[in-house]
Image (spheres, rainbow, N blue to C red):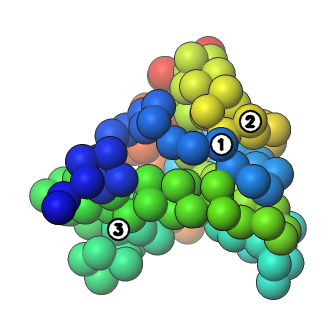
Amino acid sequence: MFDTVRYSSDFYPDWLPAPLCKVFLVRGPAGGGKSTYCAEAATDFDAIIDLDECFEKVCGVFGHDAGPEFLAEALIERNLQLQALSRKSTGVAYFINSAPKKSDVYFWESILTAETVSIVPTLETILSRDISDRRKFLAQDWFREAE
């Protein structure tokens, strides 16, 4: 039978079981360097959970370029990966989430017992990078929302 909790596309899955491993919430704007930080920090025993990569897994297109029609499926994939942390006994997990608002940070810290790492260069730095116009727009939006 279809398990609506296990296969939920919730943005904020408050039903997640507690992780067994240490979790780092890596937050910041699009184009800020979150993925780079995680790739450099992670070892072979660690997990990196990134909604952009979940989009790529479900539709073959990296998150910022994927269509909104794939969002629910990408969230299901992300939530399944987060749920799997309740069985991860080696290494740590890096969870990439923009989390511009304090309430976002609080939610993820609480539900994942996560430690937050903020990767927040200046908007000018991000806009000067060779990134897509979509990512620049998302970065500007992050700074408008950030608390």
Q: Which mark is residue 53?
A: none
- Describe residue 43's horizontal placement relative to residue 145 as left or right: right
Circle 1 crowding by C-alpha within 10 Å: few under 14, some 14–19, many from 20: some
Whether residue 48 can be seen here? yes
- Residue type at mark 2: give it: Thr
Separation of marks 1 and 3 at Cα, in angstroms: 24 Å
Furthest residue toward front? 1
What's the residue at 55%, 55% (across, down)? 82
Of callouts 1 and 2, the N-terminal one: 1
Q: Nearer the viewer, mark 1 or mark 3?
A: 1
Please tell me which residue lies in front, 17 or 22: 17
What's the residue at 74%, 36% (across, down)? 113
Residue that mark 2 sits on: 113
Circle 3 crowding by C-alpha within 10 Å: few under 14, some 14–19, many from 20: many
**Figure check: 20 above or below 49:** above
Of callouts 2 and 3, the N-terminal one: 3
SS type, badge 1: loop
State yes or no: discs 1 and 2 in contact (Cβ < 8 Å). Answer: yes
How far from the left and from the top, in percent, is residue 136?
Answer: 46, 49
- Describe residue 138's horizontal placement relative to residue 58 as left or right: right
- The quarter holding residue 54 reads bottom left
Residue that mark 1 sits on: 18
- The quarter holding residue 21 reads bottom right
Q: Nearer the viewer, mark 2 or mark 3?
A: 2
Query: Which image quarter holds the N terminus?
Result: bottom left
Residue that mark 3 sits on: 55
Separation of marks 2 and 3 at Cα, in angstroms: 25 Å
Circle 2 crowding by C-alpha within 10 Å: few under 14, some 14–19, many from 20: some
What's the residue at 65%, 42% (across, down)? 18
Q: Nearer the viewer, mark 1 or mark 2?
A: 1
